[in-house]
């Protein structure tokens, strides 16, 4: 059974200073056995910040890993497994970048009306350290 949910994503990326972003979206959640699937949409700024395109996102929450798949003007499939390095590609209109994610922390906290995912990871792009990231994802239903 699908549930309507609110998805709140707050991230801090550190690289010669902190850059934080927060996104709140409406979405749908479906649970199949041990796995949870959350689909939601985000607006993607295009250059001047006035025009935006929609990025469709799917978050797969499994017992020991989280996957985030984004499709739109930019596309990626990120996999987070605590203590492991995973590789994917980040596709943009200007080309493709190789991305390695070094996941240091992956924690899932349950509440009576949702759950929270805490991620800490290092991001490497084209074999160069890009930033250290802390991401807090909250999924709540009514």
Image (spheres, rainbow, N blue to C red):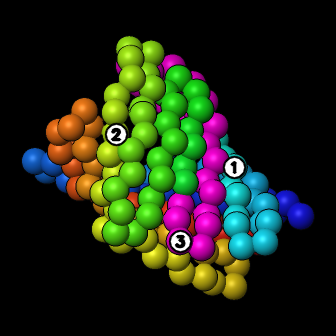
Whether residue 56 is in magenta: the answer is yes
Does residue 12 appear in this view? no
Crowding around mark 3 (Cα neighbors within 10 Å: few <14, some 14 to 19, many 20+) is: few
Label 1 sits on a secondary structure element that is strand
Q: Residue beneath label 1, please? A: 39
Residue 21 x, y percent position in the rendering: 38, 50
Residue in the picture at 34% in, 33% down? 98
Specify the label residue 64 is tagged with.
3
Label 2 sits on a secondary structure element that is strand
Residue 88 x, y percent position in the rendering: 43, 40
Does residue 33 appear in this view? yes
Dot 1 and dot 3 residues touching (CB under 8 Å): no
Q: Nearer the viewer, residue 54 or 107?
A: 107
Which residues lie in the magenta part? 43-66
Dot 3 and dot 2 residues touching (CB under 8 Å): no
Residue in the picture at 34% in, 39% down? 99
Q: Residue beneath label 2, please? A: 99
Disc nearest the viewer among 1 and 3: 3
For residue 83, side relative to residue 37 (left or right):
left
Label 3 sits on a secondary structure element that is loop
Relative vertical location of residue 75 with respect to residue 6 in this rendering, above or below: above
Residue 36 x, y percent position in the rendering: 70, 64
C-alpha gap between disc 1 and disc 3: 19 Å
Residue 49 x, y percent position in the rendering: 42, 25
C-alpha gap between disc 1 and disc 2: 23 Å
Relative vertical location of residue 84 with respect to residue 56 in this rendering, above or below: below
Q: Main secondary structure of the magenta part?
A: strand
Give the position of the N terminus as an image quadrant: bottom right
- State the residue lying farthest toward the left: 16
**Among numbered discs 1 and 2, the one appearing first in the sequence:** 1
For residue 140, side relative to residue 12 (left or right):
right
C-alpha gap between disc 3 and disc 2: 21 Å
């Amino acid at each position: 059974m699908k549930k309507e949910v609110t998805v709140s994503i707050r991230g801090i990326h550190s690289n010669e200073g902190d850059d934080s972003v927060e996104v709140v979206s409406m979405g749908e959640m479906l649970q199949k056995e041990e796995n949870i699937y959350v689909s939601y949409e985000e607006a993607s700024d295009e250059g001047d910040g006035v025009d935006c395109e929609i990025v469709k996102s799917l978050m797969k929450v499994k017992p020991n890993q989280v996957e985030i798949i984004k499709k739109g003007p930019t596309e990626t499939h990120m996999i987070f497994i605590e203590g492991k390095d995973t590789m994917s590609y980040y596709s943009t209109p200007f080309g493709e970048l190789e991305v390695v994610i070094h996941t240091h922390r992956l924690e899932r906290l349950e509440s009576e009306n949702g759950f929270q995912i805490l991620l800490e990871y290092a991001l490497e792009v084209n074999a160069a350290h890009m930033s250290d990231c802390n991401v807090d994802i909250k999924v709540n239903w009514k």
